[in-house]
Amino acid sequence: MTEQPRITVSPEFALIDVAREIRIDGFAPYAFITVTARMRMCGAPWQSQAVFMAGHDGGLDLGRDCPVSGSYAEPSAMGIVWSMVCTEMERVVFPPDRTEPLVIELQATDGQRSASARLVQDFLADDVTHRAVRETVDGMTLSGELYTPAGPGPHPLVIYMNGSSGGVNAPRAALFAARGYQCLALAIFNYDGRPKYLNDMPLEYFERALRWARAELQPRDGFVALSGISRGGETSLLVASHYPELVSAVVAYVPSPVTHGVVSAGEPGTGRNAQVWHKDGAPLPHLWQDNASADWEAAYASDPPYRQTHAFLSASRDAVAFERARIPVENYPGPVMLVSASDDGFWPSTAYSEIVMRQRQAHGLPTFHHVCMGAGHHVHYPYLPATLISKPHAMSGLLLDAGGTPAANAAGNEGSYLAVLDFLGRTSGG
């Protein structure tokens, strides 16, 4: 009897950060096998396809075997997943803003016979709990989503902040909780209870959030890591530098060493250079003020998608303005981890991170830098599709080029995720 083709996924159900073993068996020796993956994520369809040549035994191992054509071009156990593209871009939401599982349907066919299977990527581990946080503290509304690990605790705490799209990243917070950290996905703007835009943001909001979290969440050994991506990375460094006694560690993804204006996240009509940060009622200087070399047209003069890095580099050429806007990272004595992307299309996060690194090293402060080589600005968690390089900005609507390639972005997502968990494990004492 002829063996029936089959796809074996191990494990079928697991957290999204778990690599799967995907094997295909039962085809004819040396058959050309087309493997297709499909899913719906946040209401939009995603798909990838790759063609393989089977071995003498009619089998494939996607972690070992290289496609001969298709959506990706290297042996990769999860390549058929991270190479998926969105096929209805007008409906895309990315990265996911909800924690529903991602169900991926797999099919393999040689044109005559076929096999199918699925794999399920979860964000919520068993017994991780969630509650919305809406607290008024000294007249300010703290808003976010709290995810807590299973078990009695106490658990170390991560406070995570999004970038210039605002809102919160619930899936990332849920994954931190799955790995033993209670995580507060803290909203800065564009979320329930918070301002719609980034304009005129007081640092005292973050001070209140840190004090509330310490008192109410009772983190293990008082450990509170502050983390964020892009403008959230800038925020993490800035807040730790101004309130060092409240922060145990910093993880800054694709951050900036200087403060900026609202850029793409401001109220309509206020302009890209409108003020963001205030402390004690006074504005903090930012890079674009009185800048002799700043040129937004360096980014927007060409056809979209726009590579904003060109504009940020133009402003960085004014050394006086740069130093005036520089975040005093030497004021924070605790450990800092920087995650950058060497082909960042939004701003030059690797060069920016090296500036932070050198400034802190000059003061003998513990600092680590993980570079996602060849990757773009969108640094996420492992095994998420890594193909969405250009998309409209959630606030401004501008079509922006984040940089990178799908393969480099996928490698950056996986490598940085593991590096951050290692850093947090070492700094939190386990």
Image: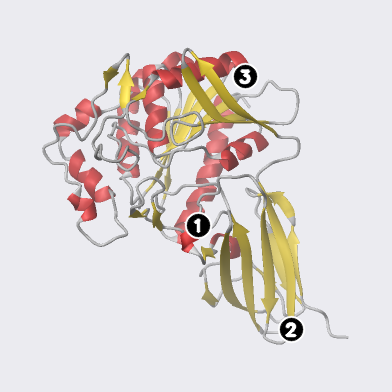
C-alpha separation, residue under disc 1 versus residue under disc 2: 33 Å
Q: Which residue is mark 1?
A: 92
Which secondary structure, mark 1?
loop
Crowd rating for badge 2 (residues with CA inside 10 Å; few <14, some 14–19, many 20+): few
Quadrant (top left, top right, bottom left, bottom right) of the N terminus: bottom right
> Vertical placement of 144 versus 59: above or below?
above
Left or right: where 267 falls relative to 89? left
Residue 253: which disc? none
The residues tagged by marks 3 and 2 sit, at their Cα atoms, a distance apart of 56 Å
Q: Nearer the viewer, mark 1 or mark 3?
A: 1
Q: Label 3's element?
A: helix
**Does the image show residue 111?**
yes
107 sits left or right of 426 in the view:
right
Badge 3 amino acid: Leu
Q: What residue is at 57 percent from the left and 63 percent from the top?
A: 45
Nearest to N terminus: mark 1 or mark 2: 1
Q: Amino acid at mark 1?
A: Val
Residue 113: mark? 2
Residue that appears at 71% across and 40% down: 125
Q: How is the image coloured?
A: secondary structure
Mark 1 or mark 3: which comes first in sequence? 1
The mark nearer the N terminus, 3 or 2, is 2
- Residue displayed at 65% across by 45% down: 123
